[in-house]
Amino acid sequence: MAFIPYKTNDEGRVKQLKRKELQLEKELQNLIEDNLSELFGVTFLASEYSTGERHGGRMDTLGIDENKSPVILEYKKNKNQNVINQALFYLDWLIDHKSAFELLVRDKLQDKIEIDWSSPRVLCIAEEFNKYDTYAVEQMKKPIELIQYRNFEDNLFALNILTASEESKSSNKTDHKNYKIEDHLQKGNDDIMELYQELRDYITELGDEIVESPRKNYIAYRIIRNFVCIEIYRSHILLYLKLNPNAHKDLISLKNVRNVSDIGHHATGDLEVRVEKKDNIDLAKELIEKAYENNSS
């Protein structure tokens, strides 16, 4: 995808913005670390995290995402850097040193969090990747995502997802459960499964870049960040949407929509929609599309 940004003025005239180079890799790293939550839904844990004297490596950025899974971020300034091999090394190291990561989370966040080791991943961020990088990641089917960035004048920063991670493969080296869609399907009756399948088809057809990520308590759908999570129960489905409830106050009064920003829940998203029957589907789809658009633009 080509990045061709334009800025419009009050008269409706457009001006193409020029690219503005980041001179140092550290500039990119600082920019992303300062905005990890907004960009990727990731909480910052550490910068230049050492893998120890024996392994002799340093992970550029280490964090934990909104699904409580580990995330490594590696930045590439030089087009010839072999960042993918480096990503594989750090991913394997992290899986073999779970206790070190869990200790880091406890110390940094001052909280005991149950880490979801089913889907650790690496985000490789660079201005350019070549065709061999993309091919290698697609063939390896590892939880490595290639993300291209562009920096422009007028403080415009853009991201482009080149490859999404193969999350279903990510826990092969762990002793933790690899959650599957089937685990959730067993919870609902036949009518609920039919409703879920209609919602699932609708969500996955919104864009090729959407990743379906089964978790312990819900199924997450994301681009870079989650935009909707689904919990399946015997006789109903709960959708948790990444939308501002205050922007949808007219719907909160409905029986099946509520603001859960101050109510504890497993999934991410502050607007809850309850789906019990076919009549609830149209509203659910409308809000899903809004959440998708808000989190993909």
Image (spheres, rainbow, N blue to C red):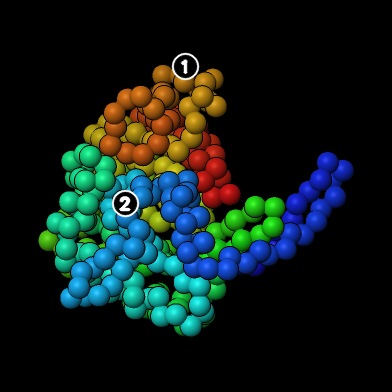
Q: Looking at this view, is 97 or 286 the one in front?
A: 97
Residue for badge 2: 45
- Residue 200 percent across, percent down from the top left: 40, 48
Q: Looking at this view, is 238 or 195 the one in front?
A: 238
Q: Looking at this view, is 283 or 57 the one in front?
A: 57
> Given the current orientation, which residue lies at the most extreme left position?
175
> Given the current orientation, which residue lies at the most extreme right position?
11
Q: Is mark 2 on a helix, strand or loop?
A: strand
From the viewer's perspective, tell me whether residue 95 is left or right of residue 70: left
How many neighbours does mark 1 have within 10 angstroms: few (below 14), some (14-19), or many (20 or more)? few
- Residue 142 percent across, percent down from the top left: 32, 70
- Residue 31 percent across, percent down from the top left: 50, 55
How many neighbours does mark 2 have within 10 angstroms: few (below 14), some (14-19), or many (20 or more)? some
At horizontal 62% and vertical 67% (from top left) the residue drawn is 21
Which of the two discs, 2 and 1, sits closer to the camera? Answer: 2
Residue for badge 1: 253
At horizontal 51% and vertical 61% (from top left) the residue drawn is 27
Amino acid at the residue labelled 1: Ser
At horizontal 48% and vertical 83% (from top left) the residue drawn is 80
State the CA–CA distance, disc 2 to disc 1: 39 Å
- Residue 207 percent across, percent down from the top left: 52, 56
At horizontal 45% and vertical 38% (from top left) the residue drawn is 242
Q: Looking at this view, is 271 or 95 the one in front?
A: 95
Amino acid at the residue labelled 2: Leu
Which image quadrant: the N terminus? bottom right
Number of numbered discs on residues: 2
Q: Is residue 238 shown above or below 193?
A: above
Q: Could one spot residue 190 in this view of the protein?
A: no
